[in-house]
Image: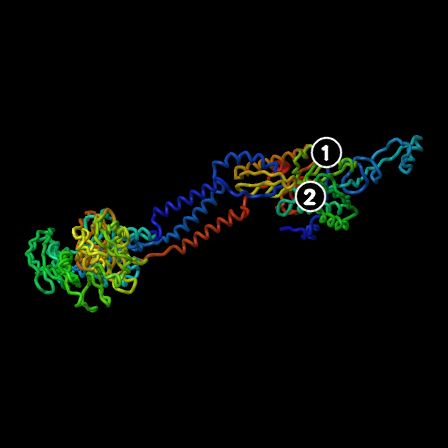
Amino acid sequence: MSLLNLTVGEFVALFSAISAVLIALYLLDRTRRRQVVATLRFWKPAENISTKRQKRRIQQPWSLVLQLLGIALLLLATAQLQLGTRNHIPRDHVLILDTSAWMGARSGRGTLMDHARLTALAWLRTVPAGDRVMLLRADVVATPATPLEMNHAAVESAIRDSRPGAAALNLDSALAFAARIQKLHNRRAGEIAVVTAERVADADSAAAFVPNNVRLLQIKAPADDCGVRRMGLRPSPSDPAGWQVLVTAKNYGSVACSRELVVEFGGAPVGTRTLTLRPGASEETTFSFHTRAAGWLEARLVGEDAFPEDDRALLEVPAHPPLRVTVFTDDPGALRPVLAANPDVIAAFQPPSSYSAGASADVVVFDRFAPSLRPRAPSIWIEPPPGRSPVPVRQSEDAVRLVRWNNDHELGAGLHTRDVQIDRAEIFSAGPDDIVVAEAEHGPVIVARDESTGDPRSAVIGFNPVRTAMKYELATPLLFANLLRWMHPGVFRPLEINAEPVGAITVRLDRNSDPKSVRVAADDRRPIPYTIQNGELRFFSGSPGTVRVYEGGRELVFSLSLPEIGDAVWDPPAHIRRGIPRGLPPESPVTETWPWLALAAAVVLGAEWMLFARGRRQAHVIRRPQSITERALRRRAS
Amino acid sequence: MATAAEPLIDRKLLEKLERLTIRWQKSFPGLVGGHNLSRYPGPGIEFLDHRHFHHGDDLRAVNWRAYLRLEKLFLKMFQVEPRVPVRILLDTSASMQTGEPSKLFYAKRLAAAMCYIGLVRLDTICIQPFSDHLYDSFVASGGRHRLMPAVQYLATLEHGGSTDLLQVTREFVSSYAQRGLLIVISDFLDDADPVKALQYLADFGHELLLVQVWAEEDRTPPWDGELDLEDAESGARLDLSFDAAARQQYTEAFDAYAAALERLALSNSGRYVGVSTNTSIEDVIFGPMAHARAVQ
C-alpha cells in the first residue's frame, strides 16, 4: 500500500493541518441554531451546566469525527492510495548521459559513446513501465533531450541519437539540474543515473554534492591519449614576414606517451619535435616560419591513440602582404628613410613624368607634384601646387610655427611636437568634413579627407616634412605611419590566431585598451556575448567555429576546432549505487482505490450533513412523566 | 401531521364518547339538569327538607297539609339537579403554537371532545379562550346537535398574545359569579407564577380540572450544540450550548413544574392531567382523563 501523489509525511502534515483548523473552528465558533421555544423558563437551569462544559468540550463530536473521516478519505483519494507493492509506484528518473568530447575516445571495438549508449539502454530496460524518465545530455551544459517521458521508446530513441559533443563535462551542474527537475515534479523521485567516463572539465566541475539517489554507470576510459591542447600563431617581432607557432600537447592518459609532433604549413614541414609526456603532463613547443602567403598551418601528433580527434590542430594563416607605396618625386633620397623605417612598407620611387592614374600601388605619394588625373588609390600630397591641390590652398606663409596636433583622431595619435619653425608652408581651407591633423598659427597645414566625397582617402601636407625643421622631429615618421595605417588599417593590425578547444575562452586585454572598443564576433559577424572583469575578457562558445576579438587595433582569432577534454577525473563518493540494477521484482497488480475513497468520503460527508448540518431532529427516547395521580392510582391498584 | 384543515374531531371518536360523562366532585347551586347531584335545595322533584316560609317564597311550595295541622307555613324544599355550567378555559397564547402538531390544535380537539361529552349529557358548556385576557366566549347547551357550532367556533380561534393567568383569573372571577367545574386546557407556561392565579380560582370555589398540554420538544428538547433560543411569547433571546446533561436538567425542571401544578389541583380537590401532543385524543380521554375521574 502506498500513496502515489503524496509522501506519507506530506499526507500526515496536510491532514494534521486541516484537522487542526477544523478542530479550532469547532472550538472557537459553531453556527448557532435559532429556535423558537414556548418558554425560556426551563432553559435557564440548563444554561448553567452547558456554559460550564462549553469551553472544554467539542460540540457535536460525532459531526467532527465524521468530517475528519471524510477529509481523510478525500486526501487519500487525492493522494491516490494504491494497494500493491511499493516497487510499482511510478517514479521520476533522470538519466544523465555524458556527451562530452571525451566520449568520442575509442575503447575496444567502439567509442566510449557506444558503450555509454548500451549502458544507458540496459539501465532503461530495468526501469518499470510506469516510471517516467528524462534524458539529460551533459557536456559543459546539461541539455534535456526528452521531457519526463513515460514512453520509454522515445527515451531509447533519444539515447541512440546521442553523439559526443566538443566540450568537457560539467557534472556538478548536470547533477544539480537533475535534482531540481525531480524536486519540481510532484512525483516520487526515482534515480539519477549517470552514465559517464568520469572525466570532467576541471576540479570545479566535479560534483561537490552528490544526491543519495545517484546511480553511477561507469564507462571504463582508455589509458592512452596524448593530444594537442592548444596552438597559437602570432607575427614574429623580429621578422616582418615571420610567424611564431606555439603548440601545447598534453598526455590525458594514465601511461606515459612518446609522440612526434609535426608542424606543417601548406604541406611543407615547419618543424618536428619528439615529445615524451608523463601522465597528466603537458608541454609547450615553439616553432617559427617565414611567409606572407595565406595557407593552412597544421600541428599533428604522429601515431595512434584512443582519441585521434585531438591529435591534430589546424589554423588558417591569412595572407600578410607588404604595403606597396609609390612615390612620385624628383628627390627620392629625401623620403626614402621615412618609408624604409617601416618593415611592412615597400616603397617605389618614380619621377613625376612616369605617373599613370592606373598605377598599381596601395598608396601613392605626390611630392610637390599634382597629377591631372586623380589616382584610384589612397594618396598623400606633399606641398601640392596651390592651384591643383585636392584641398584648396588659402595662402602660403613664411616662418610658420606648428601650434596644435589633432590628438583626438587616430591620424594625430602620438604626435606632440610643437613650436617647430617651418620656413614656408601652405595654409589650407579645410571643409566641414575634412580632418585637420595639424594647425599653424595661420590655419590648417595638414588636412585629411576620407571616402565621404567619393574619392579614395587622401591627405595633404602643406610643407615638406623631410626638408624643413620637422626632419629632425620624431613626429615625421609617426605622421607617415599614422597616415599609412589610416589608409590601410589591415596591414598594420597586430594579428594573433589561436586554435582552442570549444567552451569558455579567456583573453587578457591590454592595460590601455578601452573596454568600449572591444568587440567579439563569430565568423558570420554575429556578435557573441562576453564579459570583461579584471582586465580579462571571457566568452563562451559551445560549438566549433571561429571567433574574432577586436580590441582597439589588435585582432585575435580563435579557431575553436579542438575538442575540449577534461583536465580532472571525478572521484565519486562511496555511498552511491553503482552498476545496472539486477532486475525488477515480480509484477503484482496494483489496485486503484481513489474512486472508492472519493465515494466513501462523499457518503460520510453527506451523512454528516444529513445528521447535523440540516438540523434534522434526532430521535430521542422520551418517557412521559408519571403524574402524581397516576402514581397514586398505580399504588391503589397494587 | 395535523393541519388547520384537518377536522377537530371525527365521527368515530364521537361514537366512543357517547357513553362518557363529565364528572365533578364539588356540589354547586344551580338549575336542574345534568347528572351531578346537588346538596343545595331548589326547584326539583326529589323532596329534600322543610323550612319556614319567608315573604316572597313561592306559594306553590308551601306544605298546606302541615299548615292545616300546625297552622304554620312551611315550605317544602326539593333537591336540585343543577345545570352547573362546565367552563373550558382554553389557552390561545403564542406559546401554544409550538410543537408538531401545535399544542393549540391539540387543545382545540380536546376541548371539542369535552364539549361533546357535556352536550350529550345536556350539560351547558362554556368555551372561554384566553391569553393575557379573556376573549369572547361561546356557550353550547341543549344536546349533541349543538356540537357543530362549538367546533366551528373552536376552529376559528387563533394563537396570539402572551399568557397572563393572573389577569385572566381576575377577569374570570368578575365575569362569572357562579361556581362550577373549570377545565383549564393550557401549557401553563406563564412567565409569572401561574400557581398563584390557579389557587385564586380554587379559593373562589371553582373545581379545577387542569389539563396541561405539552409538546415533546417542550419537555425534552431534541436539539444539540449552540442554540439561539427565542421565547415565542415575549421574544426574549437566550444563547446557550445544549447537550445531554443540560437536556436532563431541563427535563427535570419541567417535570418539577408539572408536579407543582398537580399538587395544586389535588390540594384543592381538583384534578390534574398532563398530556403530550403525541398522545391521541382518544387515549387521553380514556386514559389519563378517566384515571383522574374527569370523565366517567
Q: Residue at x 42, y 45 (%)?
A: A18
**Which quarter of the figure has residue A463?**
bottom left
Which residue type carries mark 2? Answer: Gly
Q: Position of residue A549 (x, y in %)?
A: 23, 56
> Which sits in the foreground, A553 or A55?
A553
B51 lies left or right of A331:
right
- Looking at the image, do the residues carrying marks 1 and 2 touch, with CB atoms under 8 Å apart? no
Q: Which residue is mark 2?
A: B160
Q: Nearer the viewer, mark 1 or mark 2?
A: 2
In the image shown, does A595 or B165 lie closer to the viewer? A595
Residue A69 screen position, x and y as percent: 43, 47
Helix, strand or loop status at disc 2: loop
How far apart, in angstroms, are the residues tagged by discs 1 and 2?
A: 26 Å
| Placement of A61 over or under B4, stated as above or below | above
Q: What crowding class fits label 2: few (fewer than 14 Cα within 10 Å), some (14-19), or many (20 or more)?
A: some
Is A601 on the left or on the right of B229, as rendered?
Answer: left
The residue singled out by tag 1 in the image is B202
Q: Residue at x 84, y 39 (%)?
A: B43
